[in-house]
Amino acid sequence: MESSMKRAKLEIFNFPSSDVSINSKESEKSYSESIKAHPFHDNSHSIADIYEDGIFRDGKGNVIAVFIKRGLPEYAAKMAANVLRSAATKTSLRSNIYGGLSPNSGIAGYFDYRGSPIEFKYRKTAFTYENEHRWRDVFPMVDYVSQIYKHILPNQWAKQDAAIPDITRIHNSPFSTLTINSHFRTASHRDTGDFDEGYGCLACLEGNFKGLALTLDQFRVNFVLRPLDVLLFNTHHLHSNTESESMEDNWTRLTCVFYYRKALGEPASYAEYQRRFQAALDSKCSKPPVVRSIVVKSNGSSTYKPSAFNPVRLTPFLFTSVVHRLACSRDKGLCVHEWLLETGIFAEEVLFGEPLCVSDGIPERSYDELERVQASDSFFKVPEMGGFKECDFTMQAALSSQKYLERTQLSELLNAELFDMWVRSRDHWLKLVKEAWLKLKARNPERIDFHWNNRSEMNTAFFDLCDVAKQVMLSLLEKDSATATEEHFFWALYAAHLSASCRNELQMPEDAMSVKKLNVKLKDFHFGGARYFKNMPIEEQMRRLKRREEIEAARRIKKVSTKRIDWLLNDSFDYQTEDGPVDYGKMNQISPELNAKRVSHESGISVTPLKKTDIIEVLVVLPAPQTYRDNGSHFVDNDFHGSSEWQRFLANPAAKRIIKFYGKSKYVLPKAVSSGNLHIVYAFQGNEPLKSFDFIVLQHVLTTMPDKVAKEYVASIVQRTRDCLFLEETDGFCRSHYVLKREIQMKYQPIAIACFQRLHHIKYGVNEAVIRTKPQLQELFPDAVLRYKIQGSPLNTTLLMIPGSQ
């Protein structure tokens, strides 16, 4: 049965939606309008990629973000992911930050629903309500993040904790709400509706992905999150995600944002809490509230404005004050940083051989050269109002898989109780359809259309069959909720099966009970049914609720359903009924308090203040010039001269300035530079001084070495570095490599290495320089804590910062 179930799930729910398209003109228009207000920022937009723990501040010293690597224990992330994975479904509510398409996103915890047409506001989300029996598995994750927040930003945590209504807390934390995102690259945006005086908390729960860093757009800084990482940041600054750097689009990434939804603490919300609370006290039928009273609290101050942007000028040395592992060199690094800012291009060329920002170097890519962000999504949309999209692909797939709803197939996939319910409900509906059809035919033998009476017993039987079908779907999926895409394909299959049954078993014309007609009734079932339900007599309401519980119980096989009534109709005082204790000792797991101390680095780092008499020693190592070989290897093939890529690499003004140095001596070292307490000396690779230095810059030195030698050489230099090693190398990839159109990549690849080798030969005297790509450099030097990109560099220069060993 297990292999049959897997095959059924694969054929029913894993249709390759990448082959489905909707109106491309409408989608392109929606995309263009969306990115005007909320543009996507690729990695090429940013200057620094932060890989390790750190604190980033703005130009006035305000904390903007705190990055904590592996802040979550793995077990807590896994427990939470197993619950929250299904919360992220297709939603149009966030399409404005996904190029006009509906991303996979959802909310859990408590929400105000002020902008929603639903009747009851300020309460549990539908997901939390429907998954209350599993909700406690989320608590360890929430506790760990809350304690990290409290430990690192105690003032902001305290303000948020003082403001949040106690009945809307998630497990005694200062968070009321979680937003869960899956396979979702966000465009530039600011969060709205959360607590102004607090910080947003972001955790990556699981995933198989590369790239997708969180970018502080205006600061041009990326935080490269991996599973178990936590980021605390001011969400009222513009932020987004960089592109995926996976070669295929089958990457996965599940993240969770923790915050206090401020509308839950406004007067209207407290009035609603009090109304429900009093109703619960007065009612003899409902369970008593789990809280004794509603305590009204101050909700803090609100500006509902973006946070002020105080720019900070970036240099590589600034990040000695940002990255935790470089904290011991903070004062010395900031001294060099200030010298770079004061002295400008001269100082930048002294240390790095070129300015940190080259305005006339390799030009940025144009919009037409880049892939559209959601090209892999192929504009496929799941209908927001139930039912399914009646496109050729969906119907073809449904027709080929409807066999799984036939008795012989379904009997192998379901338990006996649920299968029996399906058979009886299906047969009953078909019997009533047949009776109605025969009456219509008796009046008009030529009739080919079927009149569906919404107040008939047949309509009631259809809704009942849909209730059974929903549990059949969940049984096939082996979980308690389905994603929007899974529902889309199942209901298409369901409609195709019923239409075929009417045609084959009742000999009805195809158009009489068409898939289109059934789709209309499915939409009525999904959304209209809830409204009609309220107007039914109480006896009928109770009968239907009891019937739904029976069907769900059949799926669970003797498991008692925890769902009491539909979430839409829930007006009970059920706040905090989902709460409960977590015994970390019994689970043999670290407590949230100890974990917060573990990851917040309270001890172990000592910063020695820089004295005015202290000398900061910097060594800049240059490639040892090789014997000149005029074999043409440093020239670019003439066939490339007319190409647009050749123009980008060698016809830009910055590259032309390098080419002017062709033939000049490269055997003379620059003179040492001294400025205040800063002393900079030079050496060729192979003739480095044996003494240690505070900072060492390897200026394109590895272009002369194969990988093994390069790795051993860097390891030896790290031993002589007291504070930080700057590994300066050309990146063989275009800065926009992962979003570059395929045809542009094909032009880029053959010429890039040849052009870079020519420039290296002219500037450093290196024959056939070894040019490595970003992934190759990262694999060789996994200890790098930061990647800094020189903007517009004609050599496409990047710097990897590696902590020293002393």
Image: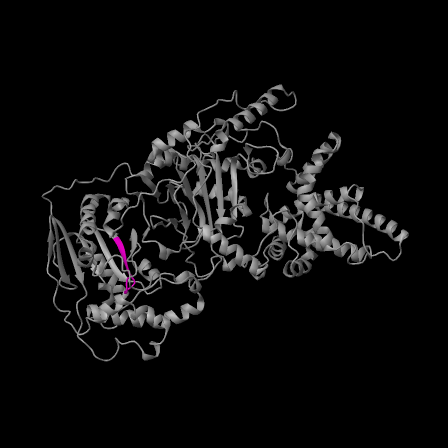
Res 116 → quadrant: top right
Q: Is residue 8 left or right of residue 259?
A: right
* Magenta run includes residue 795: yes
Q: Is residue 365 magenta?
A: no
In the rendering, at what x and y percent does residue 61 appear? 28, 39
Q: Of residues 627 and 612, which is closer to you in this image?
A: 612
Position above or below: 631 against 650: below
Q: Is residue 515 left or right of residue 315?
A: right
Q: Nearer the viewer, residue 713 or 658?
A: 658
In the rendered view, tell whether residue 299 sits above or below residue 80: above
In this orientation, which residue lies closer to the viewer: 742 or 695? 742
Colouring scheme, one of rainbow, by chain, secondary structure, one colour: one colour
* Left or right: 648 as drawn, with respect to 371: left
Q: How many marks?
A: 0
**Where 162 sits versus 395, above or below?**
above
Q: Outermost residue, left direction?
A: 613
Report the residue at 24% width, 39% height from top. Answer: 604
Image coords of residue 367 (percent x, y): 43, 61
Q: Residue at x 89, y 56 (%)?
A: 445
What is the span of residues highlighted in magenta in the rendered image?
Answer: 793-801
On the question of residue 185 being in view, the answer is no
* Residue 799, position as x, y percentages in the image: 27, 57
Is residue 773 visible in the rendered structure shown here? Answer: yes
